[in-house]
Amino acid sequence: MSAVPLSEAVAAPAQLSAVADRRDALSAPDRAAMQTLLDGHFAGVSAEQFATDLDEKDWVLRIFAGARLVGFTTLQAYAASHEGLRVRVLYSGDTIMAPDAWGSPVLAKGWISLVHRVQAEHPEHPWYWLLLSSGFRTYRFLPVFWREFWPRHDAATPPEMAALLGALAVERFGADFEATAGVVRFARPQRLRGALVVVPEGREDDPHIRFFLARNPGHAAGDELVCLAPIHDGNLTAAGVRIVRAARRG
């Protein structure tokens, strides 16, 4: 349930800031502002569903243009076991950036900083990012920052990673996860509004976007492609390394 843009031709506000908080530190007005922002970009956002999704998360990263909320993402960190392997999972919940903030790297820098902060609490286990993508912009985040992620257009998912992805998805989404398609179909999906679901002219040629559209043909109806990426510095692309370095300097 996310819409994270990467390289749209939109000028971002000059002054953006990222604020990371524990979820339970949010005030009622904070939560209301987040729901209003999400509802402005997704159809099907109910107060009950928003509260349920938020209350299961541990962290919230908010993006501000001055005092105005222009984006946020939520994260849950938890332990899981699969075939005798103990792993840690970061699951991304509701995520949105307003179009007028699309040109900024602040979300990526803030997210990386928060992830490193969370990872430091349990460095002894391998970490994985569990991500749902109902929009191509969210999926496009993966190849920009990670060398290995699944599913992808240019490599088959290794059997061990397919098994881990499937096990995590079944544990988390139960009957809403359709293993054959690799997608989650919620009973009450959140669907991107208007132009946000449309692929801009020329971007259909991007192999990652073509793959996403083929693997998740029901994305406009709110179907979510389940994705998995190992989280460690050795898996970062050159762009990811630059973001990490910038985040650490900050």
Image: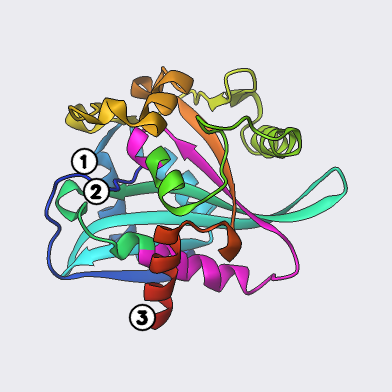
Give the labeled residue for mark 2.
Answer: 37
- Residue 135 colored magenta? yes
Q: Secondary structure at mark 3?
A: loop
Instruction: Count neighbours of disc 2 (C-alpha within 10 A) and say few if under 14, some if 14 to 19, many if 20 or more.
Output: some
Instruction: Count neighbours of disc 1 (C-alpha within 10 A) and say few if under 14, some if 14 to 19, many if 20 or more.
Output: some
Give the labeled residue for mark 3.
Answer: 250
What's the mark number on residue 124?
Answer: none
Instruction: Count neighbours of disc 3 (C-alpha within 10 A) and say few if under 14, some if 14 to 19, many if 20 or more.
Output: few
Residue farthest to the bottom, as pictured: 249
Give the labeled residue for mark 1.
Answer: 40
Q: Is residue 240 above or below residue 10?
A: below
Q: In the image shown, does 55 or 106 lie closer to the viewer? A: 106
Q: Is residue 59 above or below residue 139?
A: below
| Left or right placement of residue 153 versus residue 101 in this view | right
Amino acid type for the residue under numbered disc 2 = Leu
| Left or right placement of residue 178 versus residue 163 in this view | left
- The boundaries of the magenta stretch are 109-138
Amino acid type for the residue under numbered disc 3 = Gly
C-alpha separation, residue under disc 2 versus residue under disc 1: 5 Å
C-alpha separation, residue under disc 1 versus residue under disc 3: 31 Å
Label 2 with label 1: CB-CB less than 8 Å: yes
Name the spot of residue 61 as percent of width and height, x first: 39, 63
Q: How many numbered marks are there?
A: 3
Amino acid type for the residue under numbered disc 1 = Gly
N-terminal of the pair, mark 1 or mark 3, is 1
Q: In the image shown, does 154 or 211 lie closer to the viewer? A: 154
Q: Residue at x 41, y 17 (%)?
A: 217
Name the spot of residue 81 as percent of width and height, x first: 79, 49
- Residue 96 colored magenta? no
